Amino acid sequence: MITHKRIEMDTIEYQKARELRNETLLRPIGIPDYGWEMHDSESFHFAAMDGDSVVGCALLYPLPDSRVDVQLMQMAVAEWMQGKGIGRDIVNELVHFARFRCYHRIVCHSRENVVDFYRKLGFVTYGEPFKEVKILHRHMQLILD
């Protein structure tokens, strides 16, 4: 059974989430391990757990120029668990958390190949496509009621 929880940086779950991010997001595009953690210490971290294993993770970074916006970053689901609703459930958990904390908007830089995933969850694109880490991305947002 998959469970979801907020994790702290001083836990083994955080270390497992870092490894999942390295394996799923960074290594495939040639970014060194731990090379995209510039906002980790200011972010809220979440994990999907299968027993003691982290099978999905994401973080919410409160944008410094806004009191009402957060950025969804570093969303990863273990390759062997993709397509089972884990990513959807993580996003739903983040949305619930953001609403509870009175944030009004979640933004993300979505890789072009997963734009439809976020659209199905209510996110909309805005602005022009752009390259980040040599990959085409889209700005997306979800306005929270």
Image (cartoon, rainbow, N blue to C red):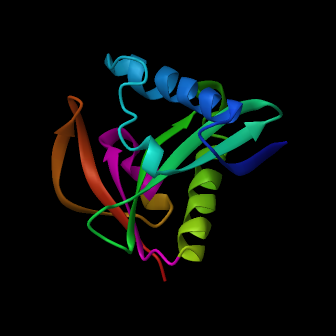
Q: Nearer the viewer, residue 40 or 125?
A: 40
Residue at 56 percent of width and 56 percent of height: 91
Q: Nearer the viewer, residue 83 or 32?
A: 32
Task: Give the quarter of the image for residue 133.
Answer: top left
The magenta span reads 102-118
Task: Give the quarter of the image for residue 137.
Answer: top left
Q: Nearer the viewer, residue 39 or 142?
A: 39
Q: Residue 125's spot in the image, x, y percent? A: 29, 61
Residue 112 part of the magenta segment: yes
Which residue in the rendered view is the most extreme toward the bottom?
Answer: 145
Answer with left or right where residue 22 lies relative to residue 52. Answer: left
Answer with left or right where residue 61 lies relative to residue 102. Answer: left
Answer with left or right where residue 10 lies relative to residue 44. Answer: right
Residue at 36 percent of width and 32 percent of height: 36
Q: Residue 27's spot in the image, x, y percent? A: 41, 17
Task: Give the quarter of the image for residue 143.
Answer: bottom left
In this rendering, is residue 3 above or below 80? below
Q: Residue 115's spot in the image, x, y percent? A: 37, 50
In this rendering, is residue 60 above or below 31? below
Q: Nearer the viewer, residue 109 or 38?
A: 38
Residue at 49 percent of width and 60 percent of height: 120
* On-image quarter of the N terminus: top right
How many numbered discs sit on the rendered protein? 0
Q: Residue 28's spot in the image, x, y percent? A: 39, 18
Residue 3 part of the magenta segment: no
Answer with left or right where residue 83 lies relative to residue 67. Answer: right
